[in-house]
Image (cartoon, rainbow, N blue to C red):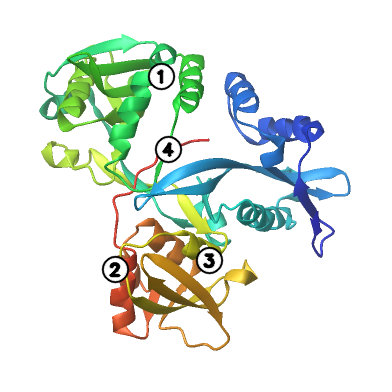
Amino acid sequence: MRADANDITCRLLNKSDAPQVRALWEYCFKDTKEFVELYFQKCFRAENTVGAYRGEKLLAAAQLNPYTLNLRGQKIPVSYIVGVETTPEERGSGAAGALMRELLTQSAERGCYLTLLMPFSSKFYQAYGWSYAYARWRYRINLAELKPLGTDYGEIELVSAMEKVADLTACYQTFGEKYNGVALRDEKHFRVLAQDLQNDGGYCAVVYQNGAPEGYIFYLFGTDTIVVREFVYKNYRAKAALMQYLYRHRSQFEKVDFFLPQADASYLFLENKNAAAIEPYMMARIADVKQFLESLSYRADNISLKIKVNDSFAANNNNVFSLQIQDGCAEVGILADDSGEIELEIGSLSAVVMGVSAKILRGMGKITVYKEESFRDLLKLWPEENNYINEDY
C-alpha cells in the first residue's frame, strides 16, 4: 500500500472488494447487464485490480489485464489497463493520478514493462504519458457501395461462434502474423468473445475453402446498419468473400460499419471518397524504460545510443539512458549527465518502440535529434511497423 500527499492510498484488491468495484463500474459505464456479468465472471480478477482509497472508501479503480503481444516478432507480456473508474465526487481530486501511477508500478513489478489502454479521452491519458500506438480504417458506407470489393470464393457458413472456437482461433492466428503488436489469443479467449457476441444477439459468418476456415466476421444488426465487430481473413480472397456476403444484405439493411487494419488499402477501390477514415485506437506507455528495453531482442547490432527521456509522471524513466546493442541484446544504463543524442517524451518513445514512424514523429517536433547518426541507428532499432489490435477488454 502506498500513500500520497492527499491521503490517498493505492493497493491491490482482495476478493471482498469486488462488489465495490463492480458497483462503481456499473455507475461509470453504460454496459449491458449481460456484459458486466460476463466480464466479472470471466475476466475480472481482484489480484489484477488496483484501487485508490481514502481510508476505507474506494475512490477509483482499474484492472491490469494480462496479455501477450507479438511485438516485432517477439512475445512480450503487457498489461492492458481496463475499466479506469472514479467516483464522481473525487474526479479532479488527484485520485485518478494516484491510481495511474500505481498501475505503472504494479505492472512493472509483474514483469509487464509495457502498458496499453483504450482511452475515453486521449488528452486525459496523454497528460500521464500515454501515446497512440495503433490506428485503423473505419468504413461507414452504404452496403451497395461494397460491390467493387466483393467476389465469390469458397463457402460461407453462418455458425455458432461458441461451437467454432478452434476455427476462429486458427484464422486469427494466421491473420495476426501479417501485423505487429497483435494480441495473442487462445480458445479460452475466443469463448469469452463468443459468449459476448451471443449475449448481444450477434452473428458469426465463416469462410471455408475445401473445408478449411480462411476468414470470419462477428457482426450485429442495428436499425438500418450492420455493425461488424471483428473482420479477420487469412488472404485477400477470404476478405473479398466476406465483403460479398455483407453486400448481399443490401435489401435488408442500408449501411455497414466496420474496421480494417491501417495497412489495408480497400478504400482505393471505392467510388465514395468519404467511405473511410483513419481512427486512432489504442494507446501505449512504457512503465519502466530500462527494464523494457533490456527485455527486448534486436535485429540490429553494434549500436550505441544515448536517449534523453522526459517523463514528469514516473521519475524512474525521467533520465538519460545509454543503450548498447550487442548480439541482439541490450545493456541499458542511466547517465548522470545531460548528454542525450536524442530527446523525446516517454509517450513518443513508447510509440516508436511499438512501431509508429520515428520520422513522422520527428517531423512533428516530437523527437529532438542532436546527432544524426544516432537517429539513423534509432531507425535501425525500431523501424516503422504495420500495427493491429482489436481488443476491447
Three-letter amino acid code of the residue under disc 4: Leu
Three-letter amino acid code of the residue under disc 2: Lys
| Image marks 1 and 3: residues in contact by CB distance under 8 Å | no
- Mark pair 1, 3: CA separation: 37 Å
Q: Is residue 265 at all visible to an observer of this figure?
A: yes
* Residue where numbered disc 3 is placed: 289
- Mark pair 3, 2: CA separation: 19 Å
Residue 69 image position (x, y, % from top left): 43, 45
* Residue where numbered disc 2 is placed: 380
- Mark pair 1, 2: CA separation: 39 Å
In the rendered view, tell whether residue 122 sits above or below residue 359: above
For residue 165, the mark is 1
Three-letter amino acid code of the residue under disc 1: Val
Three-letter amino acid code of the residue under disc 3: Val
Q: Residue at x 25, y 40 (%)?
A: 276
* Label 1 CA crowd tier, 10 Å (few <14, some 14–19, many 20+): many
N-terminal of the pair, mark 4 or mark 3, is 4
Residue 3 image position (x, y, % from top left): 81, 59
* Residue where numbered disc 4 is placed: 184
| Image marks 3 and 2: residues in contact by CB distance under 8 Å | no
